[in-house]
């Protein structure tokens, strides 16, 4: 099930409420906060399983974003400055995914793997602007997803780390909107 399907599937119930929406981070702060969740594991904290599920959902979204940026990079539609930007953003998603995977393992969980194939709207990607719109939509979804996740983490260190990643996703979204000639910050609030 893709992340977007997960989010829109009414059967996911609490999991969907726990992680709403879709998918330059300084890893030192986020890494410290995410790894701090190991203390909860040592104490046998029952809500830890919920946090691991949320982290795995985030990891799944990051893996989907990595694949989407790969698609964009290989499309031949992105010109040099935009291609460099896409590769940079993909690299940041890889950093997020690596850190999430490490954290899930440290908490005793098993990280989800990337899918063999993602279903992307390939037939609608005919220009650089189309690729940018697709990437912006994914980044906006990631902002919403992390925004939904932050308050439901039982471990507040994990919540802080998710908020740090949320900030990175919001910057991606704003930069992509700007590259499209759109208002990079269309509203005073993110929802």
Image (cartoon, rainbow, N blue to C red):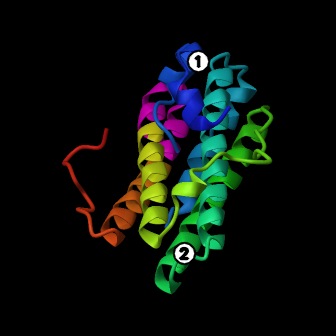
Mark 1 surroundings: few (<14), some (14-19) or many (≥20) residues within 10 A: few
Residue 38 placement (x, y as % from top left): 70, 36
Residue 186's label in the rendered image is none
Magenta segment includes 151: yes
Which residue is under mark 2? 77
Quadrant where the image shows the N terminus = top right
Residue 189 quadrant: top left
- Who comes first in sequence, dot 1 or dot 2? 1
- Residue sitting nearer the eye, 119 or 14: 119
Residue at screen point 50% across, 75% down: 85
**Magenta region, residue range:** 147-162
Q: Which residue is mark 1?
A: 12
Instruction: Count all numbered tags in the image, as a single digit.
Output: 2
Q: Position of residue 163 (x, y in %)?
A: 44, 45
In this rendering, position of residue 140 left or right of residue 31: left
Nearest to the observer: residue 191 or residue 121: 121
Location of residue 137 in the rendering, given as x and y in whole percent from the top left corner: 43, 50
């Amino acid at each position: 099930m893709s992340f977007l399907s997960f989010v829109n599937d009414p059967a996911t119930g609490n999991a969907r409420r726990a992680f709403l929406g879709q998918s330059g981070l300084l890893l030192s702060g986020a890494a410290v906060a995410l790894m701090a969740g190991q203390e909860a594991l040592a104490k046998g904290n029952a809500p830890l399983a919920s946090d691991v599920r949320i982290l795995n959902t985030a990891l799944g979204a990051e893996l989907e974003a990595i694949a989407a940026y790969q698609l964009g990079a290989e499309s031949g539609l992105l010109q040099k400055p935009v291609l460099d930007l896409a590769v940079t953003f993909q690299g940041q998603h890889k950093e997020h995914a690596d850190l999430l995977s490490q954290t899930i393992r440290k908490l005793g969980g098993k990280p989800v793997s990337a899918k063999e194939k993602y279903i992307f709207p390939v037939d609608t990607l005919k220009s650089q602007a189309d690729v940018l719109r697709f990437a912006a939509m994914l980044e906006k979804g990631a902002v919403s997803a992390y925004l939904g996740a932050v308050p439901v983490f039982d471990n507040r260190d994990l919540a802080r780390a998710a908020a740090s990643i949320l900030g990175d996703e919001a910057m991606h979204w704003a930069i992509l909107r700007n590259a499209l000639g759109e208002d990079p910050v269309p509203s005073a609030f993110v929802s």
